[in-house]
Amino acid sequence: MTENVFAFTTMNMTSSASDSGDDMDDSKGEDEMKPLSIVTDLSPSSPNGPLKMPKSPSKVSSKKRIRAPPGSAKPEERRVLHTHGRRTLYTAGRPPWYNMEGQLTNAFVIGICGGSASGKTTVARKIIEALDVPWVSLVSMDSFYKVLSHEQHEKAIRNEYDFDHPDAFDFDLIVSTIARLKEGKNVNVPVYNFATHAREKAMKTIYGANVVIFEGIMAFVNAELLKLMDIKVFVDTDSDVRLARRLRRDIAERGRDPQGVLKQYMKFVKPSFEHYIEPSMRSADIIVPRGGENDVAINLIVLHVHNQLQARGFKLRSKLAQSTHNGQPMPESLHILEKTPQVNGMHSFIRDRGTSRDEFIFYSKRLMRLLFEFAISMLPFKDVVVELPQSMTYNGKRIAVEKIAGVSILRAGETMEQALCEVCKDVSIGKILIQTNLDTGEPELHYTRLPRDIKDHYIFLLDATVATGAAAMMAIRVLLDHDVPEEKIFLCSLLMAESGVHTVAYAFPKVKIVTTAVDKEMNEDFHILPGLGNFGDRYFGTDFND
Amino acid sequence: MPEHHEEDRQKTVCLQTMEPDVIHSNKTSEDCKPLFKENELNELEEYNFGPNFIKLRPTDGVRELQTVIRDKNTPRTDFIFYADRLIRLIVEEGLNKLPYRKCSVTTPTGQVYNGLRYEKGNCGVSIVRSGEAMEQGLRDCCRSLRIGKILIQSDEDTHDAKVVYANLPKDINQRKVLLMYPIMCTGNTVAKAVKILQQNNVNESNIILLNLFCTPQAANQLVTEFPGMTILTSEVHPVAPSHFGQKYFGTD
């Protein structure tokens, strides 16, 4: 019975090319929503993707039209979007999505509308593929069906609830979600359960992206939603073709009888298309006849989006390195650990290129512990009165912060986690992987995994060394996008370059910068001078030069 | 008048049944009371015990460590966690008093960094038992440091401190000595330990005492008796958390 409902929702649920993996354990599988054309093209032994590909094409296509029970899909299958070119889109790093001041630039929102089974998803996928930009979010309207009352639920089971009516969608939530995505922030998209017609308890997190594609049958019905879209595409596929697709899909893959499918089509799907969907074509900027087969139209769209994106692009790291903060006084947000003989001695060990790895690890850990004791004393404290065993009271201090999280910037930041745990009981640890793209020299975001309620935490952002500040800036931006207030972020490192200090302090003046030393210069490879070399390589022993 | 008397007695009975511990210990600590007013424990005047008496900078973080250690309601796991943190800070500060020399190192980028090297020739001495709680903290900073031990017990009748056991590095007279004892009430135990070191030809000025909590009396006694010794503590306060050893080792 419940399958009848799916006939109306046809193709797709929420799918995201840029799901950051924040939230891998709740949503349903996305691989099931992939259009056949893409899925069948998959090779099980994909070359580039570091994440696992679905095991076999046949397995994926058989799962494709069946709503899998929650949690059945493997997380790694859901985090990636595979394309014709056998590329894995999500796993490509995200280049900066903010400017030198650390401020956000709006994402480009593409709206795709069209009748049921018109090929909206195929068009979306083709656009994503041809765009060739990492970090694209694909959001489907199907996630935003309203939660049904008991009576409505019964009706839906009897096949008498109209899912093809604008009232079936929660437009307030759609507008706020798309608005947030446009700001580059992450959103929690509800996971709609088509069996119970309610939302799953756990939401699916979609991370902010450079391009957001929103598709659905009623995508152009709401005026507010239309305002958020930078380009509006209507997929106009002949109604005969659409009906034929529906028939084939429902009969072949869901084992339903042709009479029932036709009855539904005539009762809800067709009237809805004529009343709401077809008239909304007026709002479209581009109408794509024949859907996904229309390569000319798709190329035109892609060309336009490319131009728009290029107009917003920027080279961040090189700009940061060139920016002259020379002679400016150090910002107030910078806090340097006092250079005692011990601290200076530890620095001598860490900086000496002749230091053995054993000693390098030992002294850097000692230094980190002092760094975190120093950083902790900058958190807010409150006065307390405690009872002594001597039956008196004592006016002391306790930390006035409930939750503290460490967020390490991989790889070097991870080395600091242990020292943080040694001074901070029950600290949660998040991780962010940022790597430098060797072609562009730009930092790219590859992976984030943060505590669920990260916005309620004070954050110690960990990176062993900060040179240009580009990676630190990106990590801070990620935290801000997760609604962490700027003043709750502490950037903790062992060594910084002056320009990095200025860059971070200029972009995020409220972020506290805590370090054990600041060096004056940086070479053309963005290494700190005199510095200490590549901290991660020396700590993990991955420098094979010696 | 009799009525009033009756009321007072009722009150006492009530208190005793509810909080017998409080009543009891109030009686025993009565002699301490004239020293300070309750609730003004932290507003004591700044003591000055000379240049060789050093107090850890009382940051909010340090104040929290002291508060948790003193709080009688702190669970033991927390107590050890916070005590170890404070010990580590005292040890790191104490190490700053050890000798070093300037040196230049070459960094992996080929540049020169002007830093310093620690000199050899130091050792630690812990006073059993609570001093041993600080050994690990010192060991975590100096992996192969020699550590001696002194066991001192006070005679139950005369309250005189007596040395029961001492095992020190042979060449201790040529070393800087980090003497470890976390809580000082009277200073007698430490005074005895310093005398043992002196008997082993250790120069007073080569001793650095690592201490967490110290009473003004103890501080006064030690700076008077051993003016050349360096004393490092985190807090000078009339009430010392004397339950430290018992709680740290779990023997209450």
Image (cartoon, rainbow, N blue to C red):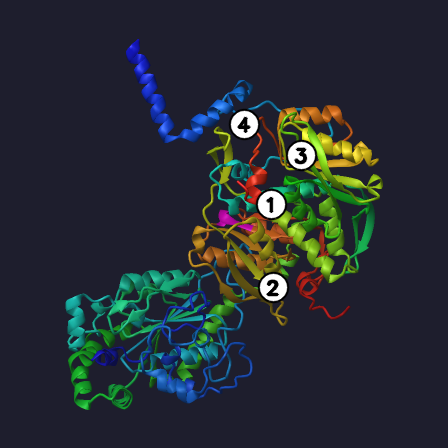
| Residue position marked by numbered label 4 in the rendering | B42
Residue B84 numbered mark, or none: 1
Nearer to us in this view, B3 or A378: B3
Circle 1 chain: B
Circle 3 chain: B
Determine the residue positioned at 40% across, 84% down: A60
Look at label 1 and name its amino acid: Asp
- Disc 4 crowd rating (10 Å Cα; few below 14, some 14-19, many 20+) is few
Look at label 3 and name its amino acid: Gln
Measured in 3D between alpha carbons, the distance from the residue under mark 3 to the one under mark 2, in whole angstroms, is: 52 Å
Look at label 2 and name its amino acid: Arg
Question: Does A462 lie within the magenta span?
Answer: no
Please state which of the two labelled residues, at mark 1 or mark 3, is closer to the viewer.
Answer: 3
Residue A52 is situated, as x and y percent measured from the top left of the image, at: 50, 79
Measured in 3D between alpha carbons, the distance from the residue under mark 4 to the one under mark 1, in whole angstroms, is: 23 Å
Measured in 3D between alpha carbons, the distance from the residue under mark 4 to the one under mark 2, in whole angstroms, is: 45 Å
Nearer to us in this view, A533 or A476: A533
Please state which of the two labelled residues, at mark 4 or mark 1, is closer to the viewer.
Answer: 1
Determine the residue positioned at 63% across, 71% down: A438
Pointers 4 and 2 within a single chain? no
Local secondary structure at mark 3: strand
Local secondary structure at mark 4: loop
Q: Which of marks 1 and 3 is nearer the N terminus?
A: 1
Query: Which of the 4 quarters of the picture holds residue B46?
Result: top right
Residue B106 is situated, as x and y percent measured from the top left of the image, at: 80, 57
Up-down: is A239 above or below A367?
below
- Residue A331 visible here: no
Measured in 3D between alpha carbons, the distance from the residue under mark 1 to the one under mark 3, in whole angstroms, is: 25 Å
Residue A411 numbered mark, or none: 2
- Residue A418 visible here: yes
Residue occupying the far front of the picture: B157
